[in-house]
Amino acid sequence: MMGKHEKLIQDIINYANEKYNKKISISETEKALEAFLEKHQLVLLGSSLNPSSIPPAISTDDKKEGQEMYIISDFIKNAHESHSVSFEYIIDIVKGTMLTNALFYKEDIATLNMKFKGTEVFFDSTFLIYALGYAGKAQQEPCLELINMLRSNNAILRVFRHNIEEMIGILEFCKNNLTKKVHDPHGTINNFLDKGYSSIDIDRIIYGIENELKEKFRIKVIEWVDYDNYSHVISHEELHERLEKNMTYRNEVARERDVHSVAAIMRLRKGVQPRHIEKSGAIFVTNNFALARNVKEHFFDEEDPKKIPPVLHDSILTNIMWLKSPSEAPDLPRKKLIAETFAATQPPEHVWSRYLEVINIYTRTHQISDESFVFLHYSQAARELVMDITMGDEDIISTGTISDILNEKARREQKKLDELSKCKEQEINDLKRQLRDSKEQMATTTELQENRVNSLAKKRAKITSNIIFVFLSIIIGLSIYLSNFDKIKNEYPMLSKIIIICLVVIPTIMSLFNINLLPCKKKLSDYLVHKFKANINYKYFKGD
């Protein structure tokens, strides 16, 4: 593992130097890799239960640190796409973090194979948006793996009505802003644009969202959790204040929904203080780490630090489920890393906002085509180029950046045209070669066919001509043998003389002039060969 680690670090250093002309040291690279895993894979997992072990927030204000983290994420993305062995090394590291995560919750390894017993697992809105594939395949696959593993372990899958309403609100936002250049935190707008979806398509998705959750994942919608025992009711105001103080919400309704979700989980638990997720009664799964951390801090009990909080980050639950039966989802670590890397290489909101502002400035002084306009605003390629150029530093973005992106677009298109031209040229050459080979093969086949036909026709003609000549010879011999020549001589003296002359003179003349009957036989044979060839071709080769 140490050898793999050293090789991985050196590969990252070389990548940064070759692609970005950035020289980073071994220690800086190791720190950046650790920071990436902490931020995107939650390496320091003890913090998921004990607030005192929460690591300090990873600062991205340091531009150099932000650039190094982007280089790490871009390196991982490139390693995956190029099937590099470095990607497999990173997978090993991720597996290690997943094991660490799960074992923190499973100090008693004997409880690892524990099945869920009446525990309802509720999913947050964004998690289900990802699971349904509305943000793309990379984000979808880890969510699907978790859902499948939960179902195979007898978990009861649920979603609150207010989370369905929130999902519909997200999709309505996408529909209304499909071409309005707004920042999309979920990646759904870009995914819908990449797939060519229209507002009608999104309406169809909204209309069928509940059926899709039920049919695909067997997730039931829970309308409301009753307040049947007020001793299990938590203070909404206190939790609301904590979330308001420590988290940034786009609107008040979103925070209220999170508070209602947590409160409903606590009512469903009916005062139970679970130490095992499988027996917790109810759990809320979110991919919002800030929400999971703040809720855990709010309910943390120093006397019972292993108590399962009402909200868990999806990666924690995924890791535990994976450790239960890793053979059922062998590609889960890979899918998790791909999903996190995809998210890490997308422009953050402040970068994208600055980029859109500069586009507006650029279009006032430059004439661009509609195609280029759409490319700059909506294409995934433009997003990748923005991050390649800026590495997350919005101050770098200028009108020159837009020119660079359009030039790179033109270069890539020209490269595609050149590659297409080469492919077409190769296809033409291949077709010419195939045609030439086909003609040669056809000529060879035709020659063999003609040779077989000639051979067969000659053989038949020879047999037939021999039979004819033998037959004629027999007829002549029999005629002479059976004829009464004396009677002919007496009754027809002139005829007898003619016969004698023919029998004597004709052979003599043929002998003097070296004439024989073979040419006749040859002509007959040639005639028969021609006829037989025509007959054979018609019968066996359809007249070819």
Image (cartoon, rainbow, N blue to C red):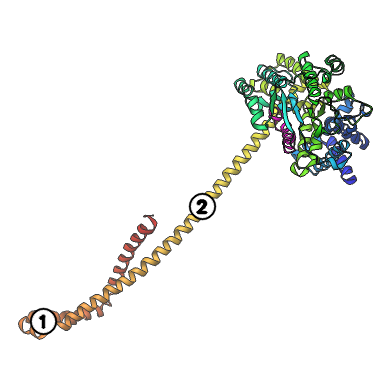
Calculate the distance from the C-alpha at mark 2 to the C-alpha at mark 1: 69 Å
The part of the chain drawn in magenta is 130-153
Q: Is residue 142 magenta?
A: yes
331 to 516, vertically: above or below: above
Q: Tell me: 482 left or right of 448.
A: left
Q: Position of residue 146 (x, y in %)?
A: 75, 35
Disc 2 marks a residue whose amino acid type is Ser
Look at mark 2 in the image and give the residue it sits on: 438
Amino acid, disc 1: Ser
Query: What SS does tag 1 mark?
Result: helix
For residue 238, which quarter of the picture? top right
Whether 371 is drawn above or below 141: the answer is above
| Residue 145 visible (yes or no) | yes
SS class, disc 2:
helix
Residue 325 appears in which quarter of the rendering?
Answer: top right
For residue 383, above or below residue 502: above
The residue under label 1 is: 496
Q: Is residue 44 visible?
A: no
Q: Does residue 428 appear left or right of residue 488 in this picture?
A: right
Check the picture and name the quadrant holding the C terminus.
bottom left
Q: Decide which of 367, 287 is in the foreground and name it.
A: 287
| Label 2: few (<14), some (14–19) or many (≥20) C-alpha neighbours in 10 Å | few
Image quadrant occupied by the N terminus: top right
Extreme bottom residue here? 486
Question: Residue 210 location, x and y as percent?
Answer: 65, 25
